[in-house]
Image: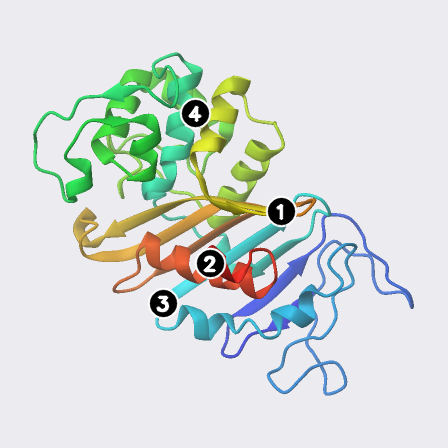
Amino acid sequence: MKLLAAAGASIVLTFAKPALPPGGLPTAGTRDFTPSAETADATGSAETAPASGSSSFASILSSVEFNERFGKFDACFVLKSLDDGWTLRYNEPRCVTRFSPCSTFKIPNALAGMDCGFLRGADHEMKWDGTSQNRKECERDHTLDTAIRDSVMWYFQRVAAGVGAERMQKYLDALQYGNRDMSGGLTKFWLQTSLEISADEQVRFLENLYTGKLPFDARAVETVKGLIVFKKGDGWTLSGKTGTGGKGGKSMEAILGWYVGHVHSGDRQYVFAVNASGDGAMGPKVRAITIEILRKVGLTPSTSQ
């Protein structure tokens, strides 16, 4: 089902399994729907979504105003329910377009480092070599825990080197991670060089991570899942990783932002991937927009920002 956004981009709700509400609707896996005067509100957004466990989602989404929230950025938003199998996509053509994963690759990088034994665990410490970094928080010794929290590039470049090219390629192939292209170099292939991945592919990777389908040691999986928890509260947990790409590969002049992750809300689980392009697009900004959308649809409380 397709819900029309304010200007051009559409919101598409896709069902992994046929859903047939009372009254009978087509049971195709994906249905495009243009609201009529009887089925749309003043903004051109559909009022109902015939999906088990998500019957109120379309009416809620009609007030999200994706275009307004992303503003000047060209952006996409993918949210998948791990319980019902439906997937929501905003700006569907961009959802399948590949971009550099930037620092979101720290998730599979950490998994590979732990799985092969290069990293011992969350407290695995590496010494800063004294070279100047683009952020002061990177100019100190770090553990895996703090390196993920502070998005420390040099730490994960050493992790990639420790995993090695041959093993890393095998991991990328096993994960079916984007285009799996490491030609940009072992310590920078994910940094706006050769490796690219779409938001849809990020969601597939995260779905496999949170449903136990990745070819990694169970301890590695649980450790990394714990390390990317961003905030939690009574009955909810938000996990995720940002990524920022810049002009000429310099993240100080941001033009690409990512936020990918997982929401555990009550007894429901969701994975998501969001990216945006444009001057000033950066991971923290995309994260803030994502959290606002998740809050708007009731998956995180207003205090989660």
Find residue 132 and report its horizontal and vertical position in percent: 8, 37
> Between disc 3 and disc 1, whose residue precedes?
3
| Separation of marks 1 and 2 at Cα, in angstroms | 19 Å
- Amino acid, disc 2: Thr
> Residue furthest toward the left?
131
Say which of 195 and 146 sits in front: 146
> Between disc 4 and disc 1, whose residue precedes?
4
Q: Which mark is residue 235?
A: 1
**Which corner quadrant holds the N terminus?**
bottom right
Which residue position is annotated with label 4?
111
Find residue 253 and report its horizontal and vertical position in percent: 19, 57
Q: Secondary structure at mark 1?
A: loop
Q: Is residue 239 visible?
A: yes
Q: Is residue 250 left or right of residue 103?
A: left
Find residue 13 and report its horizontal and vertical position in percent: 66, 60
Please name which of the two marks, 4 or 1, marks the residue nearer to the observer.
1
> Residue furthest toward the right?
23
Q: Is residue 146 left or right of residue 172?
A: left
Which residue position is annotated with label 3?
73
Q: Secondary structure at mark 3?
A: loop
Task: Say above or below: 289 vs 170.
Answer: below
- Amino acid, disc 3: Phe
Task: Say above or below: 16 vs 89.
Answer: above
